Image: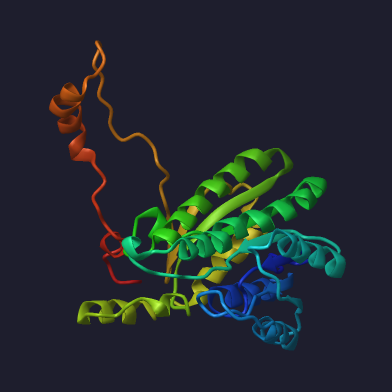
Amino acid sequence: MGNTLDGKVVLVTGAGGGIGRDIALASAAQGAAVVVNDLGASLKGTGQSVSAAQKVVEEIKAAGGDAIADGGSVADADAARNMVEVAVKEFGRIDAVVNNAGILRDTFFHKMSYEDFDAVVKVHLYGAFNTSRAAADYFREQECGALVHMTSTSGLIGNYAQANYSAAKLGIAALSKSIALDMKRWNVRSNCIAPFAWSRMISSIKIDSPEQEARVEKIKQMTPAKVAVMAAYLASDAANDVTGQIFAVRNNEILLINQPRPVRSVHRGEGWTPETIAEHAIPALKANFAPLEVSADVFSWDPV
């Protein structure tokens, strides 16, 4: 069997390190020409240097692959469009976009500034929109294409001190579903991955207890390479009938994440009043309330 991405051109954002770097390397190893995008900024999104992306390009070329670096910001619509156009100009086409770029500005909600919220949503959610929208024109023309977006259990389940990141990541899941619905007629696929992997972004998690330290040690076993395999698969023709889904990758586990659906209902023929809601509706529904959990409560077993 040949490489799954032979002849394909893939744009990977935030690919100067961590998960993005591994996705770029895995895509190239599977035969794709890769646009390695990275702003070269700090975790908070400040500062800029294309050198991180250039290093990954050199790694790909040293292994016999084909790649080019791009230092644009996904938060800038023109720069995002330029990334896609760089791919087409350099390699003749664009087949897949992996929306991986991200920043963190963790702080408890009651201390979060507008700037901290705005910056994170711009990079994650607007960033995913900007690159996907730019690629959509080419995808429609060629009647095929794949989008792979990084979501997070911080958004799908919940986490402390990440209202900005959680909102953006759950927004990405909805964005992906809408793209999958709107672009199905052109054979364009859109899926999400919630990655569990040790990366620069995870390394900023506050460690303030022995339990948290033990948890972080377990996370370190989950390398970005494990996530990269799934991204390379979703970008390939082998995933032609997979769209609108959310997967989690946790070391050697691949999990399919459910999407919100009704879990229970109550009905009252004469309609409701605040009193009957309190007496009848809420007691009937309460057994199915979603608990106030964080990601670590749900993923309570050790990575396998």
* Residue that sits furthest to the left in the current view: 279
In the image, 197: left or right of 70?
A: left
Q: Quadrant of residue 237?
A: bottom right
> Is 142 above or below relative to 254?
above
Q: Quadrant of the N terminus?
A: bottom right
Along the line of sight, the residue nearer the viewer: 208 or 260: 208
Does the image show residue 281? yes
Task: Provide residue 13's location: percent of width, then percent of height.
Answer: 64, 68
Q: Where's residue 105, x and y in %?
A: 44, 70
Residue 46's x, y, as percent? 57, 77
Q: Residue furthest top?
A: 270
> Measuring 39% from the left and 81% from the top, which residue is drawn there?
220
Image quadrant of residue 178?
top right
Is residue 244 visible in the rendered image? The answer is no
Q: How is the image coloured?
A: rainbow
Image point (19%, 32%), residue name: 282
In the image, residue 245 lies at what x, y percent?
A: 52, 49
Q: How many marks?
A: 0
Residue at the image position 71 percent from the left and 86 percent from the top: 63
Quadrant location of the C terminus in the rendered image: bottom left
**For this view, does 165 lie left or right of residue 132?**
left
Along the line of sight, the residue nearer the viewer: 42 or 87: 42
**Is residue 7 rendered to the left or right of residue 232?**
right
Instruction: Looking at the picture, tell me which residue is in the foreground, 134 or 163.
Output: 163
On the image, which quarter does residue 212 sit in? bottom left
Above or below: residue 98 compared with residue 210: above
Q: Is residue 270 above or below residue 62?
A: above
